[in-house]
Image (cartoon, rainbow, N blue to C red):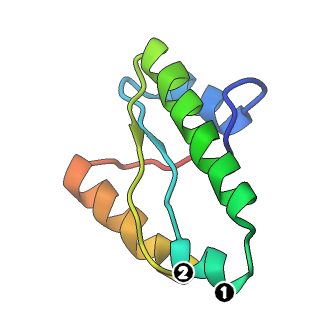
Amino acid sequence: DLRLADNSALDAAIRRSDSVFAVFILTPTTWQRHDAAPAKIQFILNNLLTLSEDCKKLGIPLLIPRCEYFSECPKVLKKLCEELKIDTVF
């Protein structure tokens, strides 16, 4: 979700946790296989820049890992949780 306003998962994380990270996983090969238009990809990347700046203002780092396929996202998220000692995902 590329928004901070009206984001119930983010609101819950902030209320329940002392430390919060936002995560967006890039999946370029999946985008290509689904014929994502270059304009759509650029729109997402531009919004990630804005989201990162907005998160920073709230003291929330935006992590942007990458994997080739959407199906790999759970592994990437699990690895992040292990590395950062995250015990709850919203």
Tag 2 residue: 29
**Whole-Å distance between the Cαs marked 1 and 2?**
6 Å
Say which amino acid is labelled 2: Thr
Residue 64 percent location from the top left of the image: 42, 50
Residue 24 percent location from the top left of the image: 52, 51
Label 2 Cα crowd, 10 Å radius (few <14 / some 14-19 / many 20+): some
Say which amino acid is labelled 1: Arg
Tag 1 residue: 33
Left or right of residue 61, residue 52 in this image:
right
Q: Which mark is residue 48?
A: none
Residue 63, by quadrant, is: top left
Report the residue that reaches farthest toward the front: 38
Residue 89 percent location from the top left of the image: 50, 50
Near-viewer residue (35 or 12): 35
Residue displayed at 66% across by 27% down: 4
Residue displayed at 44% across by 28% down: 17
Residue displayed at 42% across by 73% down: 67
* Above or below: residue 22 compared with residue 56: below
Question: Cβ–Cβ below 8 Å for labels 1 and 2?
Answer: yes
* Above or below: residue 29 compared with residue 9: below
